[in-house]
Image (cartoon, rainbow, N blue to C red):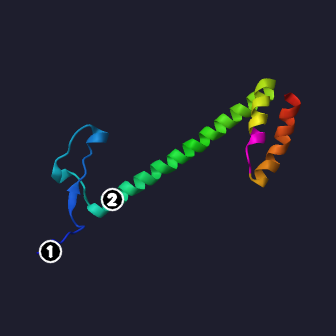
């Protein structure tokens, strides 16, 4: 005897997290299992996108802080210059950083 599975199984979505109260089953919207799965996938994608944006923003903030500090402190400029020289960059990134390294060299 084979068991048949169907994606038209429905279930109620509880609105208790946003309102703080539970609704009766007949008041709640019904979604199919496939709709719930798609909604969950979309939510995961939104959260992943937010995480990537937050990470990029963190890099920008920390990078800005490090550049500002390196341009003001000879000791920190030496550390940053040493780290930049030790790192292997793509050609286009190396070209972009040449002028900055020259400025750091003058400060250090």
Q: Nearer the viewer, residue 28 or 8?
A: 8
13 relative to 79, above or below: below
**Residue 25 on image: x %, y %:** 17, 51
Residue 73 is at least partly visible in this image: no
Of the 4 image quadrants, the one containing the N terminus is bottom left
Residue 99: x and y in percent read 85, 42
Identify which residue is drawn at 86% across, 28% down: 107
| SS at mark 2 in the image | helix
The disc label shown at residue 2, or none: 1
Residue with the most extreme right position: 106
Residue 14: x percent and y percent? 24, 47
**Disc on the earlier residue, 1 or 2:** 1
On the image, the x and y values in percent for residue 74 come to 81, 25
Residue 10 seen in render? yes
Quadrant where the C terminus sits is top right
Give the spatial CA distance, label 1 vs label 2: 25 Å
Mark 1 touching mark 2, by CB under 8 A? no
| 20 with respect to 26 (left or right) | right
Q: Residue at coordinates 55% horizontally, 42% vertically from top-left?
A: 54
> Which disc number belongs to residue 37?
2
In the drawing, does residue 77 fall left or right of residue 23? right
Image quadrant in which you'd find residue 97? top right
Q: Quadrant of residue 91?
A: bottom right
Above or below for 47 versus 64: below
Magenta-colored span: 84-89
Q: Is residue 100 above or below residue 9?
A: above
């Amino acid at each position: 005897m084979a068991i048949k599975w169907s994606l038209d199984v429905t279930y109620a979505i509880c609105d208790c997290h946003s309102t703080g109260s539970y609704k009766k089953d007949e008041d709640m919207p019904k979604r199919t299992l496939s709709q719930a799965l798609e909604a969950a996938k979309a939510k995961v994608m939104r959260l992943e996108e937010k995480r990537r944006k937050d990470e990029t923003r963190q890099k920008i903030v920390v990078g800005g802080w490090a550049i500002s500090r390196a341009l003001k402190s000879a000791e920190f400029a030496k550390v940053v210059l040493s780290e930049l020289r030790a790192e292997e960059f793509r050609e286009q990134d190396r070209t972009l950083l040449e002028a900055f390294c020259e400025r750091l060299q003058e400060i250090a």
